[in-house]
Image (spheres, rainbow, N blue to C red):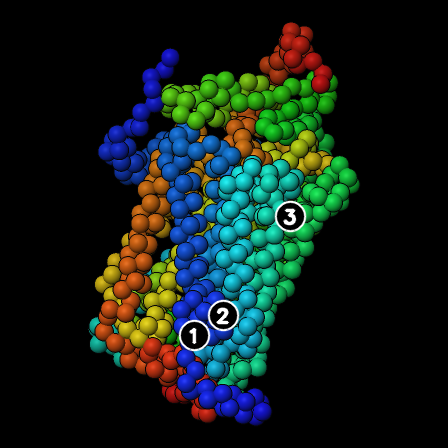
């Protein structure tokens, strides 16, 4: 049995927080997850770039507006003995601060629309997977392989997630982000994902693939990704689907073509669980 | 008009004070009494909803499930939102409207005083019903305040009570809105032209139209849920040929204007306060009105930006993205106008001004994340993550709620006749501001790092920021105890002058402090000139 869960001493935790806040190395930031992941698809990188673009636009507008405000708060205060001005209009200023945002928005709209168009283009996939949401697990069906399987929260997490389980989540690897049967896809192939649901709404979200799409009963939604990098990518259901909404993670293993073929063959041969369903 | 005036005089109106005891409140028709009841009710709901938020933050303090079961956690998130939106923020603005609009336009009372009574007293009933669902079989609603089917149809015994209470809230809001529109349109002092109206009155006029336009839409949506559940229809049930996504379209057609219903009156309050403490006329008065109208119009054509992941056609996504980005223009105009109002003023920083300034700073941060959310490919990442939670709490808490607090501090001396405790007010401001940021700023990082909203437990990589947010939430909650104390001791200060502040603008400052039970039995003949006119 694992040791009974104890709260970490507050002080240690606070020191940890403060030092982490002070740390600016990229590793520290990666551990902390301060920002959106760049991800492993072309579109996830484009999405990340758009995110950073709009972020910096906001930062710069913020610097100007807040800068003026803060200067004004310090300079134009009664305690400094200033007499208030009495202007209440300036056509020039008003035209300017209406027109400039319009230009900025137009400049943002163009690259955004381009990415969006590409995001919606799911033609000519290399393989198709149907993901079906259930309360509270996912079912994946490989259209081209005639096989399918359920994917549920891994046993380690399942045990630790119970109320007052006594298991420290920090001792569980990939707590709440691990499943028994991950989705395995080949690297560099266009995977089309068809999404639907058997009961209520769910949503399939893997941040590293920059994909989030709702799984809706009676509707088949479509999205796609092409992972450029071998690895394991984790995500979660993103649409409230009842009491165990927080416990139906998504794990995508991106492997090279040969490993993918081998996985499909062994699974189909060995494991009755993976027989066509 | 003349016959009504004659009748009123027959009643010897001058002797007609408030009724005694409970009758004064139960049968209240006086706008000031009803306004007070609205404000007290909304503050009570703010505390109830706040306690629910603290249950949420307690559970999320550390990973693992320590205190509540997931189903109860979902009930808390759902009830917290319903209570805060419909029970705290909206009634608080109606309370401010009740108190201030008649005094600001020189009217003796609201146009429809008995309906005013009714629209208030429906609310405690509605929320009594809603809160009672916590003790029903199956618990309170747990499907989120958005009530998306099919999940909402899995609600237990609470389901019909949820629908009924939402109907009641809608009826109350619609009646309140009708009352405000009729008051503004028909009972202004004769010399007050529309463009001459105070900005708070203007923003409320626009808000009231939004309410009348969209509350029936919500009522329709929840009625369809009701018939789907009990009367065999299939509006939203795929198995019967219905469409679950249609609910989301209808809900957000209500829901997005609803967002502006909660922020436009806040714009109004802040636009009243900043000129007073900057000792300078509001910059771009007319453009403020046009900007608010623009925002209200745009609110009707952007609803699907809440739904970028449901699988819309590309053309639909592009339309809603562009329309949403457009909102940044009039919103920007408002922020720039506030800053220009401060520019070269002679500012002092009493509590209302502090809250108003924090509003401009922090609402703008919420506006920035709103602009980010408009960028559809990025929104696909942000959607239903803590980034969204951070965004709407920034516009609602240091946005709407701070504006309400600013308004309460601003007009409190007019209501009570005494100055509140300024140092405690400032302490309340600083603690609230520090803790509100400590609570909600880390949520941006959580969302970007991939934490979905509405989950009772999370992966360990999210532990640190969640801990910070929980500490902030408790700090923010406890800071409100200072506000309670300030309000309870509001009559212990020095007597307030009629103007209360240094030459503020508006008719409400021409009546005595405290404002007598009846003000403007006859409309004021001459309006005090606007500051911009004084200087022109």
Q: Dots 2 and 3: beta carbons under 8 Å?
A: no
Residue at left 54%, top 30%?
Answer: A244
Please state the chain letter of the residue tagged with numbered disc 3 in the rendered image.
B
Q: Which residue lies at the image location 61% right of the left edge and 26% below the top edge?
A: A138
For residue B228, which quarter of the picture? Answer: top right
Q: Position of residue B310 (x, y in %)?
A: 64, 42
Percent position of residue A180, x then y: 55, 18
Q: Where, by quadrant of the figure, is residue B141 drawn?
A: top right
| Residue B459 visible, this angle | yes
Residue of label 1:
B19
Write down the residue under mark 2: B27
Few, some or many residues within 10 Å of mark 2 (<14, 14–19, 20+) = some
What quarter of the picture does the C terminus of chain B occupy?
Answer: bottom left
Q: Nearer the viewer, mark 2 or mark 3?
A: 2
Nearest the eye: B402 or A191: B402
Q: Position of residue A175 (x, y in %)?
A: 45, 24
Q: Earlier in the sequence, mark 2 or mark 1?
A: 1
Return the residue at label 3.
B248
Disc on the earlier residue, 3 or 1: 1
Instruction: Give the spatial CA distance, label 2 vs label 1.
Output: 9 Å
Measure the C-alpha gap from mark 3 to mark 1. Answer: 47 Å
User: Could you say where residue B373 lies in the image, as x and y percent from the top left?
Assistant: 53, 49
Residues at circles 2 and 1 in contact by the CB criterion of under 8 Å: yes
């Amino acid at each position: 049995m694992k040791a009974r869960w104890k709260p970490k001493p507050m002080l240690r935790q606070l020191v940890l927080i403060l030092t982490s806040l002070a740390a600016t190395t990229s590793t520290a930031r990666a551990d902390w997850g301060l920002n959106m992941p760049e991800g492993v698809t072309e579109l996830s990188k484009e999405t990340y770039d758009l995110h950073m673009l709009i972020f910096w636009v906001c930062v710069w507008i913020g610097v100007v507006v807040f800068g003026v405000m803060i200067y004004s708060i310090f300079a134009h205060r009664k305690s400094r003995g200033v007499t208030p001005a009495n202007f209440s209009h300036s056509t020039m200023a008003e035209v300017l601060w209406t027109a400039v945002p319009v230009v900025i928005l137009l400049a943002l709209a163009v690259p955004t629309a381009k990415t969006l168009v590409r995001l919606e283009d799911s033609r000519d996939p290399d393989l198709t997977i149907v993901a079906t949401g259930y309360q509270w697990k996912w079912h994946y069906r490989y259209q081209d392989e005639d096989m399918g399987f359920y994917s549920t929260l891994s046993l380690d997490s399942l045990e630790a997630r119970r109320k007052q389980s006594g298991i420290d989540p920090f001792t569980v690897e990939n707590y709440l982000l691990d499943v028994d049967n991950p989705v395995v896809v080949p690297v560099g192939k266009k995977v089309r994902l068809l999404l639907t649901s058997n009961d209520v709404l769910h949503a399939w979200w893997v941040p590293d693939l920059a994909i989030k799409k709702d799984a809706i009963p009676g509707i088949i939604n479509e999205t796609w990704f092409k992972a450029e990098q071998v690895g394991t990518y984790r995500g979660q259901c993103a649409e409230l689907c009842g009491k165990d909404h927080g416990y139906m993670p998504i794990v995508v293993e991106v492997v090279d073509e040969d490993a993918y073929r081998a996985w499909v063959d062994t699974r189909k041969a060995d494991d009755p669980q993976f027989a066509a369903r | 008009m003349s016959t009504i005036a004659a009748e009123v005089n027959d009643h010897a109106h001058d002797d007609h004070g408030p009724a005694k005891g409970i009758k004064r409140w139960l049968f209240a028709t006086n706008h000031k009494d009803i306004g007070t009841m609205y404000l007290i009710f909304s503050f009570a709901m703010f505390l109830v909803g706040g306690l629910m938020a603290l249950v949420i933050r307690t559970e999320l303090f550390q990973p693992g499930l320590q205190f509540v079961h997931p189903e109860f956690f979902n009930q808390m998130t759902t009830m917290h939102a319903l209570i805060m939106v419909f029970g705290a923020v909206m009634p608080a603005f109606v309370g401010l409207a009740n108190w201030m609009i008649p005094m600001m336009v020189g009217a003796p009372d609201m146009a429809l005083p008995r309906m005013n009574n009714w629209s208030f007293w429906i609310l405690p009933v509605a929320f009594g019903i809603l809160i009672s669902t916590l003790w029903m079989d199956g618990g309170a609603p747990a499907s989120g305040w958005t009530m998306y089917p099919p999940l909402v149809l899995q609600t237990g015994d609470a389901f019909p009570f949820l629908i009924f209470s939402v109907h009641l809230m809608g009826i109350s809001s619609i009646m309140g809105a009708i009352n405000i529109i009729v008051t503004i349109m028909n009972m202004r002092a004769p010399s007050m032209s529309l463009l001459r109206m105070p900005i708070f009155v203007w923003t409320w006029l626009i808000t009231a139209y939004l309410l009348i336009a969209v509350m029936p839409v919500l009522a329709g949506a929840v009625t369809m849920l009701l018939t789907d559940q009990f009367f065999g229809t299939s509006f939203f049930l795929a198995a019967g040929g219905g469409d679950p996504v249609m609910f989301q379209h209808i809900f957000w057609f209500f829901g997005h204007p609803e967002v502006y219903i909660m922020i436009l009156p806040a714009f109004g309050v802040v636009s009243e306060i900043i000129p007073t403490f900057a000792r300078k006329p509001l910059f771009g008065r007319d453009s403020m009105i046009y900007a608010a109208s623009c925002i209200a119009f745009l609110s009707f054509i952007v609803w699907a930006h809440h739904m970028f992941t449901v699988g819309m056609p590309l053309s639909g996504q592009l339309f809603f993205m562009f329309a949403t980005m457009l909102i940044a223009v009039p919103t920007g105009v408002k922020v720039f106008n506030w800053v220009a109002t401060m520019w070269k003023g002679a500012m002092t920083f009493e509590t209302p001004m502090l809250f108003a300034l924090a509003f401009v700073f922090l609402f703008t941060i919420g506006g920035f994340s709103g602009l980010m959310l408009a960028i559809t490919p990025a929104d696909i990442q942000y959607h239903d993550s803590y980034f969204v939670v951070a965004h709407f709490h920034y516009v609602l808490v240091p946005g709407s709620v701070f504006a309400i607090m600013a308004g309460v501090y601003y007009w409190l001396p007019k209501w009570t006749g005494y100055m509140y405790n300024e140092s405690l007010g400032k302490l309340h401001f600083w603690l609230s501001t520090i803790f509100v940021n400590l609570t909600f700023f880390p949520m941006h990082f959580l969302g970007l790092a991939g934490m979905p909203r509405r989950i009772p437990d999370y992966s360990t990589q999210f532990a640190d920021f969640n801990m910070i947010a929980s500490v902030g939430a408790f700090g923010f909650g406890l800071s409100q105890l200072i506000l309670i104390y300030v309000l309870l001791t509001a009559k212990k200060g020095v007597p307030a002058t009629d103007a209360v502040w240094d030459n503020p603008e508006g008719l409400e400052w021409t009546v005595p402090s405290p404002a007598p039970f009846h003000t403007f039995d006859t409309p004021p003949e001459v309006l005090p000139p606007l500051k911009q006119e004084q200087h022109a």
